[in-house]
Amino acid sequence: MIGEQHYSVVFQALPIPCLVLLPNAPEFTIINVSDAYAEVTNTNRCDLIGKGFFEIFPNSPYLSDTIWKNIFDEVIRRKKPCKVAPQKYAFPTADVPARLDVKYLEVVNTPVLDAEGEIEFIIRSMTDVTDTIYHERFLEDTQHAARIGSWEVNMARQTVTWSVGLRKIYEVASNYCPDFDSTMAFYPDESDRQKIKQAFQKAMKDGTVFHIALPITTAKGHRRWLSVVGKADLVDGTCIRVYGISQDITDTKRLTDLDHLERTILELNAQRTTSLKAILADYLLGLEALLPGIYCSIHRVKDGHLLNWVAPSLPLSYTSSLHNLPIGKKTGSCGTAAYSKKRVIAKDIANDSRWAAYKHLALPHDLKACWSHPIMDSGGEVIAVLGMYYKQVKTPNHDELIIIDRTSSLLKTIIESRQNADLAQETTAMMAQGQELACFGNWQRDFETDRTTWSPTLCDIYGINPAAYLPSFEHYLALVHPDDRERVMHIVKQIHQTGNDTVFEERIVRPSGEIRHIRSWARLLTNGDNVPIKLIGACLDITETKQAELTLKNLHAELEKHLKEVEESEKKYSDLFHLSPQPMWVYDLETYRYLDVNAAAITHYGYTREEFMSMTIKDIRPPSEIQKMEAAVALSRQHDKLFSKGIYKHRKKNGEIIHVEVRSNIIKSHGRKAEIILAQDITEKLYYIEAIEAQNKKLQEIAWMQSHMVRAPLARIMGLVDLIQHVPESGIENSELLDAINSSAIELDDILRSITAKAEQINLT
């Protein structure tokens, strides 16, 4: 027969921490203690039995004395088990009693009634939920850092449950009770509401996962983009619940849309078929769509004045009032920015001293804030000013400042590259006209004598020896590429029929077999009776130019292909930490050691998970970045909550240095202060901008050579030809004049070769 002693032994061995109390308030004498209870509270069983509960535990550092002393009141009053929500408790540690060990415990006080229904004992049992609480908080912090919230629709109870994170995303009060209809009200567009409903219906029917991204308007009127992922639980074909997560992807969507807008604008600029003003207008309209409430403008700066250029959404009467405004220290935001060569933020136009003399122009149009940024060329000169207006008093936040910087950089690239290209085009046209008039690499055919002559330079172009070659139309046709010969004969025939000047391109085959590309000019000369007497012309070897054009075309095709691959790879997935497509990790702020790392980071950086867990965050930094990283960590150590962003250099396992945009937030991980990191690789984007700037520099050099160095030899050739044609009795031998023409032509040929060589140096890869 089992006696009381056996029950006591069994009680002591219970895995659940328990103690037995007498209901003799206020002492509540302890009469039995399980070993598990003594272990959790770091006490000795013998020291507890026979003593009052509050004698052993006189107070709680986390509860007031009044609440602590009345923890048994409810069980005595109700005579039923009373469960207490998990609370924080502090117990002395076993090795150092003066040190307290904090635990989260879920407590149940259970009365044991006698035959008369009175309380004979109180059993106090506890469940240690410390790890669960820490895990829930870690999950909540992670979701907060990633702007993620969870939700559930219980079909049986017809209830909707939102996590704390989701309530923050929707900006509702903590006591807000959501339902399906009220949730749909956050989606302002009826078509979006239908998409949500259709996704739910399909999931409830076949249990599939749905993923949809749509805009919402929060309870506070803010517009945000949400990525919603949901799944239905089916039992015997019946849906019992639909659950999932929603992630605020507003910033990501904005950056993605900004990337797409920038690529579109760069493509338009590269095509050269759209005017620069139209391209800039499209760009500003795109920015205004990305940043609701903003009104953008671009002013040109010339001779110390602002000139109207592009302002697609601002009133014409306002922009006209700023036209030809002189720049200065206090000439509004744009004039001051152009003068100081620095960004100017006027958050309140009505009370900003820089607007004192000009606020009467802006305020009638309800323009209350203006942020301006100067656009400077490679030489440091201001060529334009970007203006951003708001109809409310406003200071830019961190994300808006980043967009301003990106916009200013792209505008610099677009405006400067277009100006350089236009200058190069104008110079090339002028040089081509000069070459035509000077008959560079010239030839002529005299119909009266049936004699054809070529200049020495033309013989060099065709790769023939002038001493051994007798020029003729038949010999010329023999050198024309077989595939071009019939077309060239037709062009010559048209010249004779119409008498019009002609410019055409052809290929020739040198005696060595080398194929060259030639641009030719031809002009028919007639006498007073309109009878043809001569056919004159000039040829320019454009082989290197053709090759450069082909190279640039191939490079452009490769760049387009690569941009497409990058765009396709930049798919955005919303998921929890380990399923995020972007590299993420958690590290200890004190030791710098990795605490956790997701699959995207393992793939991108090349380390295995085991390698990451044995490393510190210093191991992926180049030496030059250590000091910057330590400064950022030192700042994080000073705060309990700090969300920050920045651009850093990281080093992959293979030694490759990459540029990353890092977003971080402070969290608690297993009781330690840590930081969660999201890293985005932006190396290629920076490289493209650097490549375009390098190309612009080369184009500037070519444009300078074309506009400065080509003129001298061209002018000499033109003068000498005019002397031969109009002053035949000058007394100067023709051989001397031809030698002078030949010398100048050779000099011009060398200059053109130098220009071609510089063109070949242009490299976009």
Image: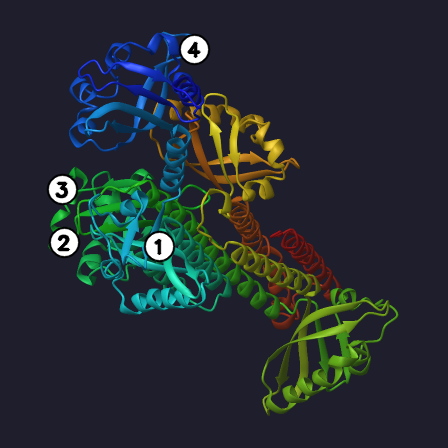
Q: Label 1: state its secondary structure.
A: strand
Residue highlighted by disc 3:
356
Type of residue at label 2?
Asp
Look at mark 4 in the image and give the residue it sits on: 94
Query: In the drawing, what numbered circle is on residue 258?
Result: none
Residues packed near mark 2 inside 10 Å, few (<14), some (14 to 19) or many (20 plus): few
Q: Left or right of 368: which side holds 752?
A: right
**Amino acid at circle 4:** Ala
Q: Are marks 2 and 4 in contact (CB under 8 Å)?
A: no
User: Which residue is farthest front?
Assistant: 1
Residue 390 against residue 53 in the figure, above or below:
below
Identify whether 61 is placed above or below 463. above
In depth, the one of 175 and 315 nearer the eye is 175
* Residues at circles 4 and 3 in contact by the CB criterion of under 8 Å: no
Mark 4 crowd level (few <14, some 14–19, many ≥20, 10 Å Cα): some
Alpha carbon distance from label 2 to label 1: 32 Å
Mark 1 to mark 4: distance in Å? Answer: 50 Å
Q: Nearer the viewer, mark 3 or mark 2?
A: 2
Which mark, by number, is residue 366? 2
| Disc with the residue nearer the chain's start (1 vs 4) | 4
Closer to the chain start, of discs 1 and 3, is: 1
CA–CA distance between discs 3 and 2?
16 Å
SS category of the residue bearing label 3: loop
Height in image: 722 above or below 247?
A: below
Q: Earlier in the sequence, mark 3 or mark 2?
A: 3
Mark 2–mark 4 Cα distance, whole angstroms, equals 70 Å
